[in-house]
């Protein structure tokens, strides 16, 4: 049996393991004892990550629409059709009539090529991906506060913390190998945990203070914590004076945010806010860990800025065991952002509207490049119904289940003149396509993924792709060449050389250097060892910037007709739209059905028992699913995991956007529950 080293295709932890291969088939998964993140462990999804690879319904040939269904086609015909249709849209409606979704499931090299294709071949900046739905507010907020929008510290470093403030993140289910470091800090250092989440999460046994706030009230909560810190003189003046600017406006703003005023807004007792503030400010090392509970709001950027304020106020940044740590979600969402699969930046966050930068890329790519930032995922989808977008190309995204308010998305997908989808399965979205292309999965190709702690790691091919499926990077090269721009690369390593030459933070990356634990960016030259902790002596843009932020309520608040606050999220055994986990029997067995978490006291008022079918309704739509009692969810709040297309949470969610980052408000809208 051969053992091939790989990187997990699920979450952003970036665990490493081996695929055992026998006779050209994957026989199993074995852990990598020496890996810095996984240390010989994996979560259940990692252990099961080979199960979907040879499912009988993998896409094996290109498909072309015929009436309501598809017919199998050869590569030549399918690729020519795509090249012709995209060229037609470009000529007839202009290059900005084409929208491209890149993929946090695909490699750095594939994302690099797809954004290059959008910009150099189509001549549009309309390229984006699921980071828009995820950490767009992190990228925007942390860039403003610190100059760099990534996790400041490293996963192993969490074990050095004395206080861990977890806000809007459920690492036990969604980043299990981060959770294992949190538990290590508790066991080995006696670290304490502060949790701010409307629900109890599975790290509850380790939590010292749980602030269960109403969804969407985080700014009020964090401001009140900072009020206490200033009132009691717990701030780090030396850090504030030497490393930051703008404290005066923040101090002025915080005067009105007393814990007593925050209590009725957030639903968190003032005493708990005081206690949390003292614990965080008084700790030797304190880190903040956050994720979607913070980012997925119409005030997502404000939420992120508030956490940056809190960390700088206490000087808890730039040292081991501290920092502001957004846990990036998908296996390669950090990388897809780094590679410029975003409408306003080239690789390395170099702005498309900066003439000098554009010139550099124009010279490297030999084409004139568009200067105005393009549309986001949500803007492109809206643009279809206003006829601004006519043709779309999706690589490894499933917006028909994952975007907010999917009734609207499905209308848009039907209205498109042309849609091509490149996936490993016939996803809900692919069913609307004119052409579907079969892609090779992570186990069948080579490339690099960048995990949440900015660690770039190589994964290797273990088996051949099924049927005629091809690696995404090869497919992009072929379409590009057919559209008159030759992309010729012999291997992903060669693509990485080009990336390194144009992306300062990846400047020192090359396959021969990406050893057992990879390298963490910034890694600017051949001799550079990589960077585990950011902002140690100064911030990326010099001084850290405080922002005075006011609390704004969610776009839609509960009222008489829709009395509940609905929030959505995930569970350990399922991943997103389920294309992979729902084809994995051991995972599907645990949670085969959609459900809504509800506080038993709320349920009693509705006359609903545990397990009964209920209807959940919002101004966007209605679904039916089972009630699941959860005593640790705040009364008046309900939670639905969004993995199940048969009762899709996104029939209900509010597409209201954060004005800066364009991220939708998945985490708060008004809903009603009806007994059936
Ligand atoms: N098993 C599994 N793991 C995954 C994924 C998956 O689908 N399945 N997806 C991956 C991806 S892409 C991502 S982005 C991450 C996401 O990882 P997380 O952010 O941990 O996931 P969520 O469940 O969306 O939300 C986290 C928590 O936010 C809380 N929350 C809800 N509303 C609010 C609020 O208003 N304020 C605060 N403070 N908290 C709130 C929820 O109760 C929930 O416990 O997970 C990654 N890992
Ligand atoms: N209600 C609600 N909705 C949400 C969220 C929420 O918390 N609540 N979270 C949002 C967040 S954070 C995220 S990240 C998005 C995720 O949204 P999506 O990215 O749309 O969801 P995935 O199911 O991960 O879709 C990935 C697709 O890539 C395919 N794929 C896997 N590997 C490969 C490959 O190697 N090549 C190709 N070509 N395709 C591949 C899979 O089959 C799948 O169809 O969902 C968002 N939607
Ligand atoms: S923690 Fe994340 S990366 Fe590690 S095995 Fe689980 S899903 Fe994969
Ligand atoms: Mo995400």
Image: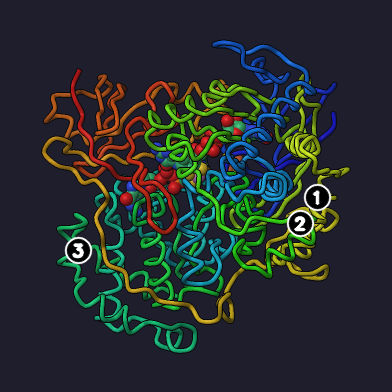
Give the CA distance from mark 2 to mark 3. 47 Å
Q: Residues within 10 Å of mark 1 (few under 14, many from 20)?
A: many
* Residue 577 place in picture, x, y as percent: 50, 30
Vertical relation: 585 (above or below) 551:
above
**Can residue 172 be seen at all in this image of the molecule?**
no
Q: Residues within 10 Å of mark 3 (few under 14, many from 20)?
A: many
Report the side of 380 relative to 338 (left or right).
Answer: left
Q: Residues within 10 Å of mark 2 (few under 14, many from 20)?
A: many
Image quadrant holding the C terminus, namely: top left
Give the label on residue 495, or none.
1
| Secondary structure found at label 2 | helix
Q: Badge 3 is on which residue?
A: 262
Q: Do the CB atoms of the residues marked 1 and 2 lie less than 8 Å apart? A: yes
Vertical relation: 332 (above or below) 626:
below
Q: Give the tally of numbered discs.
A: 3
Q: Do the CB atoms of the residues marked 1 and 3 lie less than 8 Å apart? A: no
Report the side of 72 relative to 563 (left or right).
Answer: right
Give the label on residue 499, or none.
2
């Amino acid at each position: 049996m051969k053992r091939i080293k790989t990187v997990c295709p699920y979450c952003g932890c970036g665990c490493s393991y081996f695929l055992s291969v026998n006779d050209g088939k994957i026989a199993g998964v074995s852990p990598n004892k020496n890996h810095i993140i996984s240390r010989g462990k994996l979560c259940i999804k990692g252990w099961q990550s080979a199960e979907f690879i040879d499912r009988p319904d993998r896409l094996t040939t290109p498909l072309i629409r015929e009436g309501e269904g598809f017919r199998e086609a050869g590569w030549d015909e399918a690729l020519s059709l795509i090249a012709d249709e995209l060229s037609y849209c470009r000529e007839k409606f202009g290059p900005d009539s084409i929208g491209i979704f890149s993929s946090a499931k695909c490699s750095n090299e594939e994302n690099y090529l797809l954004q290059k294709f959008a910009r150099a071949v189509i001549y549009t900046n309309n390229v984006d991906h699921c980071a828009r739905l995820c950490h767009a507010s992190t990228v925007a907020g942390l860039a403003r506060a610190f100059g760099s929008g990534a996790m400041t510290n490293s996963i192993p470093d969490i074990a050095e913390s004395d206080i861990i403030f977890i806000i809007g993140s459920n690492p036990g289910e969604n980043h299990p190998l981060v959770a294992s470091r949190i538990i290590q800090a508790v066991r080995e250092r006696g670290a304490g945990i502060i949790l701010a989440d409307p629900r109890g999460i599975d790290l509850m046994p380790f939590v010292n203070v749980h602030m269960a706030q109403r969804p969407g009230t985080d700014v009020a909560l964090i401001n009140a914590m900072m009020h206490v810190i200033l009132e009691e003189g717990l701030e780090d003046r030396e850090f504030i004076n030497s490393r930051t600017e703008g404290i005066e406006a923040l101090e002025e703003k915080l005067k009105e945010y007393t814990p007593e005023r925050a209590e009725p807004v957030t639903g968190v007792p003032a005493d708990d806010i005081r206690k949390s503030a003292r614990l965080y400010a008084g700790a030797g090392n304190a880190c903040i860990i956050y994720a979607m509970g913070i980012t997925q709001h119409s005030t997502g950027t404000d939420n992120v800025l508030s956490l940056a304020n809190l960390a700088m106020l206490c000087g808890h940044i730039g040292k081991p065991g501290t920092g502001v740590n957004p846990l990036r979600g998908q296996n390669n969402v950090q990388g897809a952002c780094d590679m410029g699969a975003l409408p306003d930046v080239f690789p390395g966050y170099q702005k498309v509207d900066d003439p000098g930068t554009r010139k550099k890329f124009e010279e490297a790519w030999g084409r004139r490049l568009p200067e105005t930032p393009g549309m986001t995922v949500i803007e492109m989808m809206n643009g279809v119904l206003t006829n601004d977008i006519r043709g779309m190309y999706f690589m490894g995204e499933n917006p028909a289940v994952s975007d907010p308010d999917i009734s609207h998305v499905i209308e848009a997908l039907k209205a498109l003149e042309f849609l091509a989808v490149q996936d490993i399965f016939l996803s809900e979205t692919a069913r609307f396509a004119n052409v579907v292309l079969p892609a090779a999965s992570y186990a069948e190709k080579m490339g690099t993924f960048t995990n949440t702690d900015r660690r770039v790691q190589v994964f290797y091919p273990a088996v051949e792709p099924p049927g005629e499926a091809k690696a995404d990077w090869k497919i992009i090269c072929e379409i590009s060449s057919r559209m008159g721009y030759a992309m010729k690369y012999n291997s992903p390593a060669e693509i990485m050389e080009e990336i390194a030459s144009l992306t300062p933070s990846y400047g020192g990356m090359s396959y021969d250097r990406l050893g057992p634990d990879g390298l963490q960016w910034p890694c600017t030259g051949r001799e550079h060892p990589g960077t585990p902790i950011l902002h140690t002596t100064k911030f990326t843009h010099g001084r850290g910037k405080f922002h005075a932020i006011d609390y704004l309520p969610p776009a839609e608040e509960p009222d008489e007709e829709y009395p509940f606050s609905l929030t959505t999220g995930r569970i350990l055994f399922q991943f997103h739209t389920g294309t992979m986990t729902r084809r994995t029997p051991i995972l599907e067995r645990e949670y085969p059905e959609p459900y809504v978490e509800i506080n038993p006291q709320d349920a009693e008022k509705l006359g609903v028992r545990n397990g009964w079918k209920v209807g959940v309704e919002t101004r966007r739509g209605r679904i039916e699913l089972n009630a699941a009692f959860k005593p640790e969810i705040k009364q008046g709040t309900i939670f639905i995991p969004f993995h199940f297309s048969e009762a899709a949470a996104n029939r209900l969610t509010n597409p209201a956007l954060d004005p800066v980052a364009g991220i939708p408000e998945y985490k708060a809208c008004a809903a009603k529950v009806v007994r059936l």
